[in-house]
Image: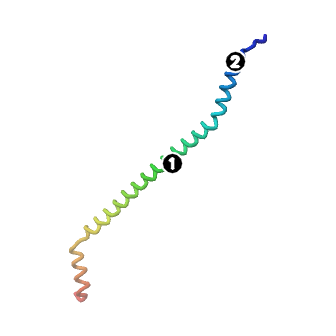
């Protein structure tokens, strides 16, 4: 049983298919650009986070060093300096 389809309908379907096939490369390239932009954004976010962590680490190391300097026993310093100045005692 063969049915005939109006030529206007087949024309519309064909043009619609051509339109979809014609737009596919542009859509694919748009997806590639969007993915690249997203990846670059995440990369910069990670770089900023790493820089912040390094700054915190540097501040903690500086604080530890200053705390060690301030925690030296001053009496022991005075005795050792006195021995250096007067080695006979």
Residue 36, given in percent of the width and then of the height, sits at: 55, 45
Where is residue 25? Give x, y as percent: 64, 37
Instruction: Looking at the picture, tell me which residue is in the foreground, 35 or 21.
Output: 21
Viewer-proximal residue among 9 and 32: 9
| Rendered residue at 73%/15% (across/down) | 5
Residue shown at 69%/18% (left/top)?
A: 8
Q: Nearer the viewer, mark 1 or mark 2?
A: 2
Q: Quadrant of residue 57?
A: bottom left
Locate residue 35 relative to residue 65 in the image: left or right: right
Query: Against 77, is 18 above or below?
Result: above
Q: Quadrant of residue 6?
A: top right
Which numbered marker is on residue 40? 1
Q: Circle 2 sits on which residue? A: 8
Residue sitting at the far right: 1
Residue 67 image-quadrant placement: bottom left
Question: Residue 48 at x, y = what percent?
Answer: 42, 52
Quarter containing the C terminus: bottom left
Seen at 52% across and 46% down, the residue is 39
> Quick one: label 2, few (<14), some, or many (20+) residues within 10 Å?
few
Quarter of the figure that contains the N terminus: top right
Residue that sits furthest to the top in the current view: 1
Of callouts 1 and 2, the N-terminal one: 2
Query: Badge 1: how crowded within 10 Å, few (<14), some, or many (20+)?
Result: few
Real-space CA distance between mark 1 and mark 2, rounded to the nearest whole angstrom: 48 Å
Q: Nearer the viewer, residue 11 or 38?
A: 11
Residue 81 x, y percent position in the rendering? 24, 81
Above or below 46: residue 13: above
Residue at position x 22%, y 79% in the image: 79
């Amino acid at each position: 049983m063969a049915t005939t389809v109006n030529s206007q309908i087949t024309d519309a379907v064909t043009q619609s298919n051509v339109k979809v096939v014609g737009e596919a490369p542009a859509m694919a390239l748009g997806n590639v650009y969007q993915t690249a932009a997203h990846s670059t954004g995440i990369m910069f976010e990670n770089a900023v986070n790493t820089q912040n962590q390094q700054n915190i680490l540097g501040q903690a190391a500086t604080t530890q060093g200053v705390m060690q300097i301030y925690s030296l026993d001053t009496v022991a310093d005075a005795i050792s300096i006195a021995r250096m100045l007067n080695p006979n005692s």
